[in-house]
Amino acid sequence: MIKVIRGDITSRTTDAVVNAANTHLLAGGGVCGAIHRVAGPELEKECRAIGGCPTGEARITDAYALPCKYVIHAVAPRYWDGTRGESELLSRCYQSIFSLTKKHRIEGVSIPAIGTGIYRYPVKEATGIAFDTTLTAQKKQNLSVEFVCFDEDTASVYEQTYQRCRA
Ligand code: AR6
């Protein structure tokens, strides 16, 4: 199942929420700042111990004070002009998320619009990659995915893509 909702990912009670992280896995701005604020300082402590994550990969931690079980920290590429392997890296980022959901037998995951904020990935292209990789993963594992959009414009792009996938 795929669902598109508008809201704050830090209040989701699915098994895992995805964080749009940086390669240092440290608290930053955007959704990352919000997740670290609500989870509490123990989250950054665990992230520091992991020691970073390359672009296009993901790492999993406990969720501490968040109402879910796990946080999956995924590092999207910074978007330049689309010629620097950005789409490949963003696809790998989603694939890494789904390898972790499979490995940890996670049945429900909430995912924000990774890469489309501070890293400036164009929302329409990023949404296409999010849906393509999700549909591929769902053929191989029992996984419900909810895309959590913070703003109305992003939610509307996700909704349109969702309707196209169902057509
Ligand atoms: N719930 C759901 N979505 C949110 C929330 C929230 N609470 N807050 C923001 N968003 P961004 P990126 C949306 O910038 O582009 C950080 O500093 C936001 O509106 O969080 O991958 C990291 O440490 C946008 O649609 O992630 C990295 O350095 C989406 O989440 C860098 O930013 C992603 O925006 C990562 O940049």
Image: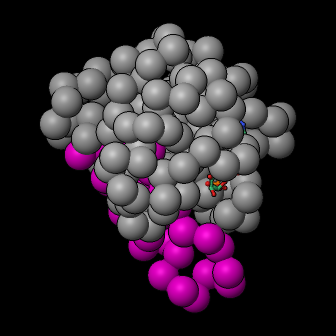
Q: Nearer the viewer, residue 6 or 131?
A: 6
Q: Nearer the viewer, residue 69 or 51?
A: 51
Is residue 11 shown above or below 139?
above
Based on the picture, tell me whether residue 84 belongs to the magenta stretch: yes
Q: How is the image coloured?
A: one colour
Q: Residue furthest right?
A: 152
Which of the 4 image quadrants contains residue 100?
A: top left
Q: Position of residue 98 (x, y in %)?
A: 30, 43
Is residue 163 shown above or below 76?
above
**Who's the residue at 20% across and 36% down the image?**
102
Q: Nearer the viewer, residue 140 or 99?
A: 99
Residues shaded magenta: 72-99
Q: Residue furthest bottom?
A: 83
Is residue 158 shown above or below 39?
below
Q: Position of residue 119 (x, y in %)?
A: 68, 63
**Who's the residue at 49% across and 38% down the image?**
44
**Who's the residue at 43% across and 23% down the image?**
63
Count of marks overlaid on the render = 0
In the rendered image, the quadrant that contains the N terminus is top left
Q: Position of residue 24 (x, y in %)?
A: 49, 59
Q: From the viewer's perspective, tell me whether residue 105 is left or right of residue 90.
A: left
Q: Is residue 102 visible?
A: yes
Based on the picture, tell me whether residue 95 belongs to the magenta stretch: yes
**Who's the residue at 62% across and 22% down the image?**
38
Q: Is residue 17 visible?
A: no
Q: From the viewer's perspective, tell me whether residue 89 is left or right of residue 10.
A: left
Which of the 4 image quadrants contains residue 32?
A: top right
